[in-house]
Image (tube, helix red, strand yellow):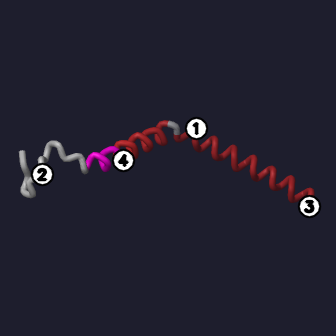
């Protein structure tokens, strides 16, 4: 089936890249929502460790 400009509509693959990006984003959002608690716990523990390490360094400097 030819469209107005003479291109074959069914074999045109220009929009496939956008669809792939949207699907990847949907999967990433689903993974974040699924592992939200684990991600929050990991980040909280990392910042707690960083904070305690910097406090130790500051006490050594003073």
Percent position of residue 60, x then y = 92, 56
Q: Which residue is identified by label 4?
A: 21
Is 31 contained in the magenta span? no
Q: Cβ–Cβ below 8 Å for labels 1 and 2? A: no
Q: Nearer the viewer, mark 3 or mark 2?
A: 2
Q: Cβ–Cβ below 8 Å for labels 3 and 2? A: no
Is 18 contained in the magenta span? yes
Q: CA distance from mark 1 to mark 2?
A: 49 Å
Percent position of residue 12, x then y = 19, 47
Q: Which residue is identified by label 1?
A: 38
Q: CA distance from mark 4 to mark 3?
A: 49 Å
Residue 7 is labelled as 2
Secondary structure at numbered mark 4? helix
* Disc nearer the start of the sequence (1/4): 4
Residue drawn at the location 58% of the way across and 42% of the way down = 39
**Quadrant (top left, top right, bottom left, bottom right) of the C terminus:** bottom right
* Disc nearer the start of the sequence (3/2): 2
Q: Which residue is identified by label 3?
A: 61
| Residue 1 horizontal side relative to residue 32, left or right | left
């Amino acid at each position: 089936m030819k469209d107005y400009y003479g291109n074959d509509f069914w074999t045109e693959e220009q929009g496939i890249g956008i669809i792939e990006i949207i699907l990847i984003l949907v999967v990433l959002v689903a993974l974040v929502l699924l592992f939200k608690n684990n991600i929050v716990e990991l980040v909280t523990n990392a910042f707690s460790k960083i904070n305690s390490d910097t406090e130790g360094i500051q006490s050594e400097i003073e």
